[in-house]
Amino acid sequence: MRKSFTKRFKITKNKKIIRRKMAQNHFRASKSGNQIRNKRKSLNMKTVDVKGFLQLKNKGSIK
């Protein structure tokens, strides 16, 4: 569980959690150019998700 979180999320120094959009790696031929360009951007997680994520991290299950 710990490695899966570290591969998918990045925590900034201000405790913001950044993730990437899904479906970027393959099966892109059927997608439009706008869809592909929009998926290049990173997203901030919602505050509800961040609270739960930080609680898991503080319990020691995520390092």
Image: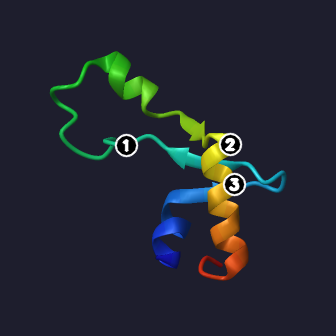
Q: Mark 1, mark 2: which one is toward the viewer? A: 2
Image vertical order of residue 62 relative to residue 24, above or below: below
The C terminus lies in quadrant: bottom right
| Element marked by disc 3 | helix
Quote the CA–CA distance across marks 3 and 1.
22 Å
Give, as a three-letter code, the residue at label 2.
Thr
Quadrant in the picture for residue 52: bottom right
Residue at position x 23%, y 45% from top?
A: 26
Decide which of 50, 21 is in the foreground and name it. Answer: 50
Residue 4 position, x and y percent, is 45, 70
Q: How is the image coloured?
A: rainbow
Residue that badge 3 annotates: 51
Residue 15 position, x and y percent, is 78, 54
Residue that badge 1 annotates: 22
Residue 34 as seen in the image, left or right of residue 8: left
| Element marked by disc 1 | loop
Residue at position x 69%, y 79% from top?
A: 59
Quote the CA–CA distance across marks 3 and 2.
6 Å
